[in-house]
Amino acid sequence: MLKGNVAVVTGGSRGIGRAIALRLAKEGADVAVLYAGNEAAAAETVAEIEALGQRAKAYRCDVADYDGTKQTVEEILSDFGAVDILVNNAGITKDGLILQLDEAKFSAVLDTNLKGAFYMIKHLYAPMMRRRKGRIINISSVVGLTGNAGQANYASAKAGLIGLTKSVAKELAGRNITCNAVAPGFIATDMTDAMPEKAKQAVLSSIPMKRTGLPEDIAAAVAFLAGEDAGYITGTVLKVDGGLCM
């Protein structure tokens, strides 16, 4: 149980982030929900958390903005008093083969998916160190381990998250702060729903469990890594992929 803990979930208004925010609330945590633009979805997530009896507040924040993330973290610390759990889930895609992938699309994905996580960790680094307590969980992807044609920017960012995870884990282990990554496989979200049926079937045929995962599967892994039972686990990458990336 996470009673008495405060969690921050970036990209927490929809999909995997929303499932994570709700699962952490069910475990007893208060939740700060960061969102990029969908205010209605963020408000709905906050209302569901409050219905579970937990405190919640939404913060509009572009995680690719260093100053913006700093200000948001300061607001969260003022509102909640402390942060015990940070989940870096915010992410975007701008797919394309390298021949058609321009610098702007490459940089945009790295800025949000990798640098955004770094910014959030940096701003919460000292507060967690002072309290000698913290759980940092970065949402990577199996493509960060395998690569993927047409996703050089996304795969690079997700691979970078794994390197960031291990580096932060080594820096903070002595302060009772863990840092781990969860690497989802093919998860049913708005992003995967928009894929052509032929492409979806091709992916499904390569998954040993022959089905897509659910956002709740990722949320369960995050809740475990955020809890007391994972206190001696740090610097690890937990794949949640139905056996796709063995």
Image (cartoon, rainbow, N blue to C red):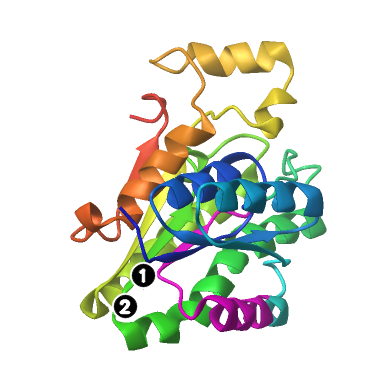
Residue shown at the point (39%, 66%) measured from the top left = 5
| Residue 123 location (% of width, % of height) | 53, 81
Q: Which residue is mark 1?
A: 167
**Above/below status of 220 relative to 106:** above
How far apart are labels 2 and 1 at the CA level?
6 Å
Secondary structure of residue under mark 2: helix
Residue shown at the point (25%, 80%) measured from the top left = 175
**Above/below status of 57 relative to 244:** below
Residue shown at the point (39%, 30%) measured from the top left = 245
Confirm whether the magenta stretch covers residue 197.
no
| Residue 14 location (% of width, % of height) | 66, 43
C-beta proximity under 8 Å, tags 2 and 1: yes
Mark 1: give few (<14), some (14-19) or many (20+) Cα within 10 Å: few
Q: Amino acid at mark 2?
A: Glu
| Residue 235 location (% of width, % of height) | 30, 60
Which residue is at the front of the view, 35 or 77? 77
Q: Is residue 58 left or right of residue 227?
A: right
Mark 2: give few (<14), some (14-19) or many (20+) Cα within 10 Å: few
Q: Which residue is mark 2?
A: 171
Which residue is at the front of the view, 179 or 149? 179
**Span highlighted in magenta in the image:** 69-91
**Above/below status of 177 relative to 20:** below
The count of marks equals: 2
| Residue 13 location (% of width, % of height) | 67, 49
Which residue is at the front of the view, 83 or 239? 83
* Viewer can see residue 211: yes
